[in-house]
Amino acid sequence: MAWEIPMVIQSYGMTPMYVEQDGSFEENASKAIEAVISEEVEPADSQRVRSLVIKGHPARVLLDIAAGADLLVVGSRGHGEFAAALLGSVSQNCVHHASCPVLIMHGENASENNPLVRERPW
């Protein structure tokens, strides 16, 4: 999981101001990824999963980690029927800039919710 310090725009102009880093962003990211892993991965398979929490833009972090990989797999959140057919900014960035093939995984019910993804009759 990648995380960044959010940028706050001041009300008197468009000058970016960074909030102070107190460690809570990394801690929250660690808790979030561990919660997902414990929810989605069977206890018997937990040794097969390794989590990383890295500061940086998600697309850049994924591209750096995937350098030299055989395959980069990214998820697609999907925000409704039409939006599910589109790529998000991170997956699109990975598709265009990865040095390896990229597989985009949609959720289990992607074909049910997306009129553009249908089972083939053949």
Image (tube, rainbow, N blue to C red):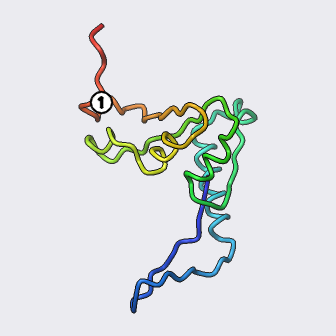
Q: In the image, residue 10 lies at what x, y percent?
A: 44, 87
Q: Residue at x 62, y 36 (%)?
A: 41
Q: Give the left or right position of residue 1, taking residue 102 as reference.
A: right
- Marks counted in the figure total 1
- 119 left or right of 63? left
Q: Residue at x 30, y 7 (%)?
A: 122
Kindly identify the amino acid type of the residue bearing the numbered disc 1. Glu
Label 1 sits on a secondary structure element that is: helix
Residue 88 relative to residue 43: left or right? left
Place of residue 44 in the rendered image (x, y in percent of width and height, measured from the top left): 71, 30
Residue shown at the point (70%, 31%) measured from the top left: 45
Q: Quadrant of residue 38?
A: top right
Query: Furthest-right residue in view?
Result: 47
- The residue shown at (43%, 35%) is 106
| Front residue of 32 and 1 | 1
What residue would you read off at disc 1? 112
**Quarter of the rendering containing residue 116:** top left
Task: Depth check: give the residue in front, 38 or 58.
Answer: 58
In this rendering, is residue 106 above or below 22? above
The image quadrant that residue 112 belongs to is top left
| Residue 70 position within the rendered picture, expressed as x and y whole percent measured from the top left | 65, 29
